[in-house]
Image (cartoon, rainbow, N blue to C red):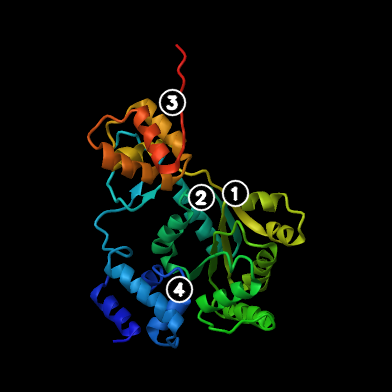
Amino acid sequence: MTVRQQVIALLDRRPDITPARFASAMPGLSTAAAHQYIAGTLAPSAFTDKHFERALREIEAGNVLRVQESAPVHITDATPASRRVRRQRDFYVVETTRRIQQVLTYCAEQCSIGICTADYGVGKTESIRYWRENDGRKLDHLVFEFDDFSSRSVVDFLSCLSDRMGLMQKVTFCSAGPAMRAICAALDEKPMLLIFDQCEMVVPRILQVIRQVWDATRHAGVGIAIFASPMLLERLQKARVRDLGALSSRVGIWAALHGVQKGEAATIVKQEGLTQIEDAAFDLLYRSTGGSMRRLMAVTDLLLTKHSGKVITEKTVAGVAANLWGMQIASVVRVA
């Protein structure tokens, strides 16, 4: 059985998974390319087969697109810390998630350029995944995560982008120009939202190419969303480089995100089962995580493993922080 036949068989077995929702499990391919592959209008290749095989494994293992038994936990500042909320361990919808959803939907609907910046571990990538499985399911989009190679080489970037759009062009230094024009032509024909993640170290020349792609295709309906650490925001605001200035002048929406808020963290900690935690210990825990969802969940997991059923004190939290991150944090000094 070919990979495409396996995908069709899965869609037959799982009526809750539509082709659009299946596409959300593959950040490496555009939704349009995924639809074409399933419909049989896009010729299979080693590249597309690899992405669909990986998605099949993740779905069969229950890591993505699982049958929803309960809704994700929505956390708001108005949610009392003592309130009992329904639990889905994998994901919490906090204000950062909602703001990212707003930016992505705005960029897609308004054909605009948007930039979201936040520290590492806040949950940008997971929030993008959540948007793709919900509001983004009906919108054509492509997620491109930069690495050390595509963030520094225009040729590698155009080659990877061409592959993810299903164009499968051989891009070299001499053919980079025609490749970019082919990408623009494909976007003119089938506009979509281009989501670029991990952009903090992307060289100015590639950001210039992204801006030029948008200039050439925005009237057809192409939007661009850029995600990065606050380093990129600082570079754009202080840029004297012409390439960055050209990009920053076209940004339609900015979102400087600050991560998990204290009230949200309190609700999450209790939802996870840490009900016996002293107020001072929680204050220390929140300071040690610095608004990072990744750190918050890591420290929660360790506390549940090592101290389940025990009263969690400041000393406990300080020890966990030292074990996880090598952080030496002190208790809050109290003045009588």
Q: Residue 180: x and y, percent?
A: 64, 78
How far is the residue under mark 4 from the one under mark 1?
Answer: 29 Å
Query: Which is nearer the N-term, disc 4 or disc 2?
Result: 4
Mark nearer the N terminus (4 vs 1): 4
Mark 1, Cα crowd under 10 Å, few <14 / some 14-19 / many 20+, is some
Residue furthest to the top in view is 336
Residue type at numbered disc 1: Pro
Q: Is residue 75 visible?
A: no
| Mark pair 4, 2: CA separation | 27 Å
Q: Secondary structure at mark 4?
A: helix
Q: Which residue is mark 1?
A: 230
In terms of secondary structure, where does tag 3 sit? loop
Q: Is residue 11 left or right of residue 104?
A: left
Q: Disc 4 or disc 2, which is closer to the eye?
A: 2
* Residue 152, percent from left and from top: 64, 66
Question: How many numbered marks have been drawn onto this rendered protein structure?
Answer: 4
Distance Cα–Cα, label 1 vs label 2 = 9 Å
Residue 255 place in picture, x, y as percent: 57, 50
- SS type, badge 1: helix
* Amino acid marked by disc 4: Thr
Using the image, tell me which numbered label, if any, was put on residue 120: 2
Dot placed on the residue nearer the N-terminal end, 4 or 3: 4
